[in-house]
Amino acid sequence: MIRNYLLIAWRNLRRSPAFSLLNGMGLAVGMAAFLLIYQYVRYERSYDRFYPDAAQLYRINAETFTNQQRDRKTVRTPPALLQREYSEIEAFTRVAIFGDAIVNRPVTPTTATEVVPSTRVEEIYATDPGFWSVFAYPVLAGDPAEGLQAPMTVVISARVARALFGKENPLNQSIQLNSSNIDGSAQFTVKGVYADVPVNAHLRPDILMSYVTIHQFMSPEVDDNWDWDNLFTYVRLRPTANPATLETQLAAWTEEQIGARLRENQRAVHYTLQPVTTIHLQPGWGDEPNPTLSGQTLYVLMGIGLLILLMAGINYVNLSTARAVRRAREVGVRKTAGASRLQLVAQFLTESFLLNVISAGLALTLFQLLQPYFGQTLTEMPPAFALTHWPPFWFLLAMLIVVGSLGAGLYPAFVLSGFRPAVVLKGTLGSAATAQRQGLRQGLVVFQFAASVLLIIATLTAARQLRFMQQRDLGLDLSQQLVVQAPAYLSGQGQFKQALAPEPDIAGIALSGDVPGREIYWRTDQYHRPGQDAPGSVTFLMIDGDFVEVYQLELLAGRTFLPTDTLQRPYPAMLNASAVTLFGFASPEAAVGQTLETGDQHPIIVGVLNDYHHQSPAQPIPPTLYRPGGGDFGNFYTIHTQTRNMPRTLAKVESTFKQLYPDSPFEYFFLDAFYAQQYRADERTYTLFGSFAGLAMLIGCLGLFGLSAYTAQQRTKEIGIRKVLGASVSSLLGLLSKDYLRLVVVANLVAIPLGWYLARQWLDQYAFRTELSGWLFLAPLLALLLIAGLTVSVQTLRAALANPVEALRSE
């Protein structure tokens, strides 16, 4: 029986090649699009789920309030928060960020050409032995927990071990860390090696330093500090613990320790627990160690994938019911011969299944062809996370075939099998039933094109916002800016500027703690005017006196830093315009000469800068305080060049750097390209929306092409009579096309209000955003009218140009 069903199904597919091709292409494109989207969503959702008992891991976040207004959401907390025991906590760890650094072995070269082993690492953290009880990375050598107990000890990743020691045993050997926070003179002892952290982790340490080493830099009393909130705090809860209970306990402990002081300053702080598995997909918290992604974007993409799959199924339903007239006599004959309705349903479902199997093979081919671009270039997903490497992949593909066969084939099967033999053998199906099926097809076409309109609006909105950010006046000059990573030494950095100052191709050099395009992590909410409460959080950045001129920043009042300015108290400081507003100064001029306070520091404001976009316009401009770095402190040199021969200038800069700092690697980038990397996520969103909007339109047009073909075929006699009576080709074209173009207009009327609402919601995530204009919604209407008109015209024009004699003779 099954063999017979398959044989008949294959013959029917071969008998109608156009129907089979249109449906097969639509289903294949829909399946391939769904698989590509599912692969990306699965990868992004896999972050931090590989830890043992990952569901019990939480990070403690903080929300701070001033005058009952929230002014900060941060993932950083003070060390004193866990200076007591909590019954809900099974294990905890505190992690302090030390940023990037140059790491080398303290060995003396034996020859002039020998190179000291060194490498740059991006993430160094200080943490305690509890880190292994929380995260439990695989250990390759040593005892990492024991190695984090003594001062000046580190545990390193396998990558760092390979870079510094090759095949040597790294245990108990010394390394030096050189960064803006560690001067490189002290030596650290390697006590363990752990496996490289997977890329789908929000915390990817290259080196873990013992937490008690912080006591060497500051003091042991730092653990009782409530103001130094520069730690990430993670907890592993007991299996029966309730996160809300721990939040209540944290609130009680905070109230007991600093409640009175907070109320006195009109401040409040609320600590919340965030599951580690949700960190990557819940943006909005400040000071994240690595970029996050909006979970809503994944939901939208997954919805698009299901929508495209549904549209492909709708095509099958539409084309199958449109062919009802051609299949009616077949059904009538088979019923007369004794076939039951169940047998006919099974036959039509077998056709649907066979077509879905063929389409799945085509979809798998498309998936593999698009994988290098979509999987690695567009979404930057590591090849190891390709969906074909996932064991349940073939089960997923089989489920797509089964669900697709039932979902797309069930309704046409019941419609076709329900014809009455006495009616269909007379050549009539009944006008009511035909009108009902026609109404359903029209409704499904409206749904398809409404979905296409929504995707087009999303694509145009994303493109407009991206262009708005790229073309916005940032308030600083990014052109011709060469950025060089500062050397590993905190002393002697000023020599580089002095050596390059005479170069005619260099207009200026600035030394700073950070550069535009990088988030400024240093932040505090302790600055306030004398006699007043702290108004909120400010970031602070170390810059030298040339920073303003090199970046062409606007000085609103006062002066910039002088070469003689230092951090000796009271030290000079500058504010940006947002900080002037935050501290309540009447104007930039009124702020100059005023004093701020924080602990025993009393910075004097000597100048005010206009706001500029240190990060992309997607982020708000934070109130910022600038402190003088002096000639020997900074992480980056910004070299403003004025030459067309950049290779020559770059060679001069490199040779000077290597001459002065032979132990430090020469690393550089061009600031405009580096800054533009912030738009990569928006470019990806625009490309994804645009690509799948195009696929949705393609699937919709395939269905419309098939429907118009069958409509023209069914109206052959009518077209012939009209031509004999003198109807022109243009009038026939309009007659056959107007019904479908009307459906496109209805689809736009349905989708445009919803598209406007969703576009407004999506733009609200940007601090600086574009405005929606009418053409964003008029363009999809015109585009779909044009595309649908061309699609329908291909078939209707052929019918209108046909010889009416042949049409009438066939009847």
Image (cartoon, rainbow, N blue to C red):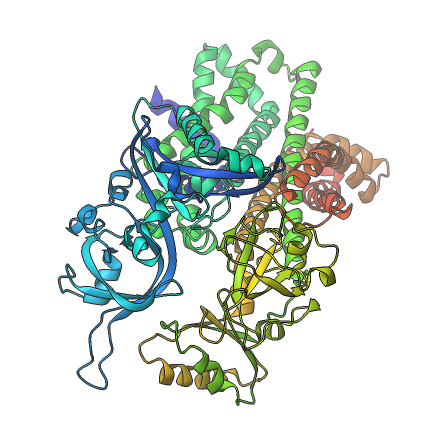
State left or right for residue 311 relative to residue 773: left
Q: Residue at x 17, y 82 (%)?
A: 110
Image quadrant where residue 254 sits: top left
- For residue 47, say whether it is visible: no
Q: Is residue 472 above or below residue 393?
A: below
Quadrant of the image containing the N terminus: top left
Q: Residue at x 50, y 12 (%)?
A: 335
Give 267 or 756, whichever is nearer the viewer: 267
Q: Is residue 238 above or below residue 22?
A: above
Horizontal and vertical percent position of residue 454: 65, 39
Give 469 or 800, whichever is nearer the viewer: 469
- For residue 492, say whether it is visible: yes
Q: Residue at x 68, y 37 (%)?
A: 755
Give 456 or 368, whichever is nearer the viewer: 456
Horizontal and vertical percent position of residue 313: 53, 31
Horizontal and vertical percent position of residue 659: 36, 85
Give 237 or 766, whichever is nearer the viewer: 237
Horizontal and vertical percent position of residue 47: 38, 42
Q: Is residue 342 above or below residue 324?
A: above
Quadrant of the image containing the C terminus: top right
Q: Residue at x 76, y 34 (%)?
A: 742
